[in-house]
Image (cartoon, helix red, strand yellow):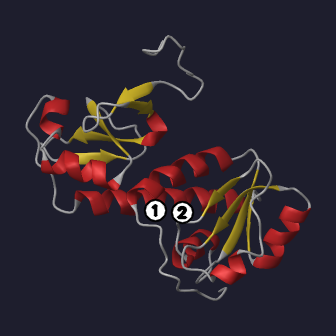
């Protein structure tokens, strides 16, 4: 029950408290960290590493605050060595996780890439998630609309999407409902908090 007397919605799973903000969030909105055997701080992106864990909101500024204020030692109840470039490393690992999940969805037939294929899925209402490269042409991207009651992901680059679909670059992609869609959206939301999403107005051609 919240302070206002309303019951919290627990349908999104158990919540954990961010050591930097003190706010409780669903686990998919946080990054878990553990201490390795050598006392080195390790980001546990998948949330499966053994040992005591501590959580930080999936937000670049919040994570940087946790690093600057040395909050991990208190959260883990032991001294830890924070590696240089931790914030950028977390972003890289999240990119890899999203790319890997998209690749699995593609292999299972739950994801397509390319303007015409995506448009067909949207027209047939087979798409649940529209994905467009952050550095794609703004004019080109406006020709496709997010599915009704669907989701939009627009903060992966054309090169990153290309890795997921076995191409050099990809501008437009779509995910069907079910399958890995929910996990892709959740992981992509964590990545969104860790990076700047403004493409500076620079466009890319479909590859």
* 201 or 120: nearer the viewer: 201
Q: Give percent across and percent down for residue 187.
A: 52, 50
Q: CA distance from mark 1 to mark 2?
A: 6 Å
In-front residue for pair 179/54: 54
Question: Residue shown at 77%/77% (left/top)?
Answer: 115
Which residue is found at the position 18% from the left and 49% from the top? 67
Q: Is residue 127 visible?
A: yes
Q: Nearer the viewer, residue 163 or 185?
A: 185
Residue at 42% across / 54% down in the picture? 193
Mark 1 Cα-neighbour bin, 10 Å: few <14, some 14–19, many ≥20: many
Judged from this view, the residue extending furthest toward the front is 4
Q: Give yes or no for contact between labels 1 and 2 (Cβ–Cβ under 8 Å).
A: yes
As drawn, is 18 to the left or to the right of 30? left
Q: Quadrant of the C terminus?
A: bottom right
Disc assigned to residue 165:
none
Please tell me the numbered disc located at residue 99.
Answer: 2
Disc 1 secondary structure class: helix
What secondary structure is marked by label 2?
Answer: helix
Residue 173 figure quarter: bottom right
Residue 88, image x, y percentages: 30, 63
The residue that disc 1 covers is: 95
Q: Position of residue 96 (x, y in %)?
A: 46, 62
In the picture, measured across the screen, residue 29 lies left or right of residue 179, that is: left
Residue name at image x 29 percent, y 54 percent: 61
Mark 2: few, some, or many residues within 10 Å (few <14, many ≥20)?
A: many
């Amino acid at each position: 029950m919240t302070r206002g007397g309303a019951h919290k919605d627990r349908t999104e799973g158990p919540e954990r408290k961010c050591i930097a903000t003190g706010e409780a969030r669903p686990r998919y909105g946080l990054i878990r960290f553990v201490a390795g055997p050598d006392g080195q701080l390790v980001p546990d992106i998948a949330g499966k590493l053994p040992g005591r864990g501590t959580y930080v909101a999936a937000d670049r500024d919040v994570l940087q605050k946790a690093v600057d204020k040395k909050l991990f030692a208190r959260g883990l109840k032991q001294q830890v060595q924070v590696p240089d470039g931790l914030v950028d490393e977390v972003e890289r690992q999240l990119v890899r996780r999203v790319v890997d999940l998209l690749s699995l969805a593609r292999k299972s037939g739950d994801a397509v890439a390319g303007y015409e294929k995506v448009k067909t899925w949207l027209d047939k209402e087979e798409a649940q998630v529209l994905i467009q490269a952050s550095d794609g042409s703004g004019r080109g991207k406006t020709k496709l609309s997010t599915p009704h009651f669907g989701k939009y992901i627009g903060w992966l680059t054309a090169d990153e999407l290309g890795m997921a679909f076995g191409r050099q670059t990809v501008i437009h992609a779509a995910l069907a409902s079910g399958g890995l869609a929910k996990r892709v959206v959740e992981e992509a939301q964590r990545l969104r908090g860790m990076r700047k999403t403004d493409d500076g107005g620079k466009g890319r051609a479909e590859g």
